[in-house]
Image (cartoon, rainbow, N blue to C red):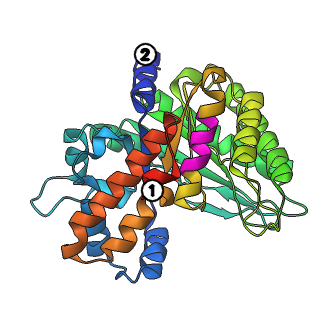
Amino acid sequence: MDKQLLRNIAQRLMADDKGLLAMDESVATCNKRFAEAGIPQTEEYRRKYREMIVTTPGLGECISGAILFDETTKQAANDGTPFIDLLVKGGIIPGIKLDEGAKAQPAFPGEKVTEGLDGLRERLKVYVAQGIKFAKWRAVITIADDTPTDGSIYANAHALARYAALCQEAGIVPIVEPEVLMDGSHSIERCFEVTERVLHIVFEVLIQQRIYLEGMILKPNMVVSGLDAAVQADVEQVADATVECLLRCVPAAVPGVAFLSGGQAAQDASAHLNAMHIKYNDKLPWALTFSFARAVQQPAMEYWAGKDENVSVAQQLLYKRASINNAARRGEYTPAIEA
Ligand code: 13P
């Protein structure tokens, strides 16, 4: 394992108040978002949409790395330039989603385990040759009365650790993403309890499987109220609970924590990141940033709506959301910058 290479990539991903852009929606997820926005669900429209993103002027000022889906690594802009080359030219490090989705876990009703380990060493070689420098694997944890169980958390943690080990062997920085979903009517306290349990087990297994902590990034959920909870925690409560939970669970050797947005409104996700930096900036042992998909892309996707004449304004909306999250990382976000 080339530890220095891994440390350097992780540090570049976390540098300069930037964050990551998750643009790695699978075909099914991308089509679902397109259907909601009235956009045709074809390979060509997915290509056009990703071209709009990777050709956004100045995006590399705000975004350090972009996580791609396999289909996108093989696509190119209208002029024939591969998307990966466009990203690198724009100062953005290309990454790849390696998991193959969360599937029903046998014998664990209501719980899922993520697939994609078979043949991963060989797939990694192809991506390394394409210039990919980092990767992502998402585990999905659902809060309900009887879940998550330790049996499911351990199965997911084990898959995350085996993926991370294969990445590090290949010189790729693994992003380890155990997502505790917001779905449900649970309280923020219940989200805290579950997120803490999940992160403890994930790091227990990462350490057992000899993951080089200095050469990985954690992508967690924020600790929030369930989407359908009658009482919704406010910005400060989310910031306090999230930072307390992470400080309890994430070793200081980990260079970076980059949040998913998980279905929060874009403004809420930015306000939460901002509040964490205002209150805790000098108490955090790791860089704390964003790796949002929806909370950066949504306004741009809706404006674009599949129409070429909307590309330029959609790109401005994308740039704006990314730069607002840079401001949040500096603790300089105010609702006024949304205007
Ligand atoms: P959201 O920010 O839309 O939750 O997506 C982040 C992600 O990469 C989920 O795997």
Q: Quadrant of the C terminus?
A: bottom left
Residue 18 horizontal side relative to residue 136, left or right: left
Q: Which of 305 and 269 is in front in this view?
A: 269
Q: Residue 35 got which mark?
A: none
Q: Residue at x 30, y 65 (%)?
A: 314
Snapshot quadrant of residue 76: bottom left
Which stretch did the figure color magenta? 270-277
> Is 266 contained in the magenta span?
no
Q: Nearer the viewer, residue 257 or 149?
A: 257
Q: How many marks?
A: 2
- Inspect the image, locate mark 1, and give the three-letter code of the amino acid beneath it: Glu
Residue 276 is one of the magenta-drawn residues: yes
Amino acid at pointer 2: Gln
Q: What label does residue 4 carry, if any?
A: 2
* Distance CA(mark 1)–CA(mark 2): 39 Å
**Res. 338 mark:** 1
Closer to viewer: mark 1 or mark 2: 1
Q: Residue 276 or 216: which is nearer the viewer?
A: 276
Which residue is painted at 69% across and 41% down in the image? 239
Instruction: Return the residue found at the far left.
Output: 79
Q: Quadrant of ligand 1?
A: bottom right
Residue lying furthest front in this view?
Answer: 336
In percent of width and height, residue 300 lies at: 36, 65
